[in-house]
Each structure stands twice: as structure tokens, then as C-alpha cells.
Image (cartoon, rainbow, N blue to C red):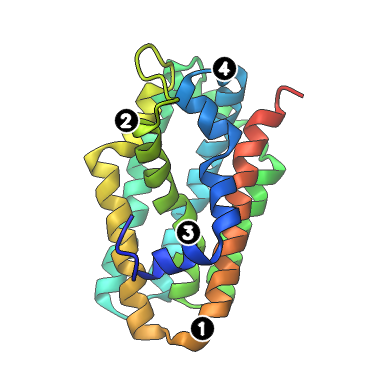
Amino acid sequence: MGAETSLFARLRSACPDEWQAFIGHSFVRRLGDGTLPEECFRHYLLQDYLFLIHFARAYGLAVYKSDTLEDMRFSAAGMASILDEMGLHLKYCHDWGILEEELAALPEADATIAYTRFVLDRGMAGDLLDLQVALAPCVIGYAEIANLLKIDPASRLDGNPYLSWIEMYSGDEYQRVARAQVAQLDRLMGLRGGEGRMPSLIDTFRQATRLEAGFWQMGLDVTR
């Protein structure tokens, strides 16, 4: 996703083990071949609802952290998109037999708390670039994962109960979101960056990627 000279590509290349553990996680592979237990996916859906709420807050923080009207608009559009997605998520959950009342009463899992609070903390302690780098594994990673699942020979698309998830994130609309995030990272790096920032940005990206993998693992652990 994005040119190999992009900031995102450089961050991903600096964290190959963590990135592969995220995009190649057993949860992801079993989504692709349709063998993921339904209870695992349901637990993921429940926690992803809470996850999205905090990511909307993160984009609200990004508006506050923005110095330009262009960055404010980009961040506000991200927040609006997530809030709109909440309605789609509620419908998707309903299709899986999960009612809104169940979502409202749901406690946060440790993995949900870990990643969302890390993102918010990086946004509070750092600048807009730090915040967007912390968000990148999720925003861009889901697009990459879905694309890989679509072309993976091990994936089973016909009759796969999770095909709609794969199609949602491999679809044109979400792919545009991911590409815009790649471009925004490059733009912010040009305005706020420099090679001296790379070690810190890599650390943020690495930790966020680890926490994303932990979110997948949370879905699998529900069967234990």
C-alpha cells in the first residue's frame, strides 16, 4: 500500500516481524479460509464496536492537534467516517445476532484498552504526526490484509461466512481511505518531520502494530 519510498512503507520495512505477525495472524488466516469459530468473530465484533468509538475520539483529538485548516478537514472527515461506520457496524452486528443493548453494556477487553489508549496517549504527548503514525497500522493494515486475503490461494471466498468483512475492507471505498492515510503521513512528515524523528516514529509504529496483533489474539482467546 503506497510507494516504497512513502513513510508508511519505511515504517513497515523497519518492523518486518511485527508487521507479519499482524497481517499473517492466525485470526486473519482463519477469516480467509472461513474456519474461524463464530464465537471468536462475534467477540471481535463486540470489541471492535468499542474500538471504533475510541478511534473517533482519536480523530477528534487530531482536529485539535491540527495547525492548518487542511489537516483539520482531513481529521474531521476521518471522525465523520467512523461515526457513519458505527451505524453500519450496528447493522453488521445485528446480522450476527448482536443487539445494540448488548453492545451498550459491553465491558472493554484488555486488548481494546491497550491499543486505543496507546493511540490517544501518543496523540496527547506528541503531535499530529505521532498520532497518525499510531493510527496507521489499523487504518492502512486492514486494507492490506483484505487485499492479501482476496488473492491468497488458501482463502475460501465461496461460502465463506466472513466474505462480507473481506469485501468491505478490500472495496474501493475503504481502499481510498487507506491511500489517503498513506498520503497524509507523507504530507505530515514533510511538514513536521526529518530523519531525526524516524527512531521515535518507528517505535510508535512497532508498538501499535504489536497491539493490533494483540487485538486479533483477543478474538482467538475467547475459546480458551
Under circle 1, the secondary element is: helix
Q: Indicate left or right for 67 with 99 as reference.
A: left
Q: Position of residue 87 (x, y in %)?
A: 36, 33
Q: Earlier in the sequence, mark 2 or mark 4?
A: 4
Q: Earlier in the sequence, mark 3 or mark 1?
A: 3
Identify the residue position indicated by label 4 in the image. Answer: 38
Under circle 4, the secondary element is: helix
Under circle 2, the secondary element is: helix
Identify the residue position indicated by label 1 in the image. Answer: 197
Identify the residue position indicated by label 3 in the image. Answer: 135
| Quarter containing the C terminus | top right
Crowdedness near tag 4: few (<14), some (14–19) or many (≥20) residues, C-alpha within 10 Å: few
| Quarter containing the N terminus | bottom left
Q: Position of residue 186 (x, y in %)?
A: 33, 73
Q: Label 2, label 4: how many angstroms apart (C-alpha)?
A: 18 Å
Q: Residue furthest top?
A: 159
Q: On the image, which quarter does residue 43 sit in?
A: top right
Q: Position of residue 89 (x, y in %)?
A: 41, 32
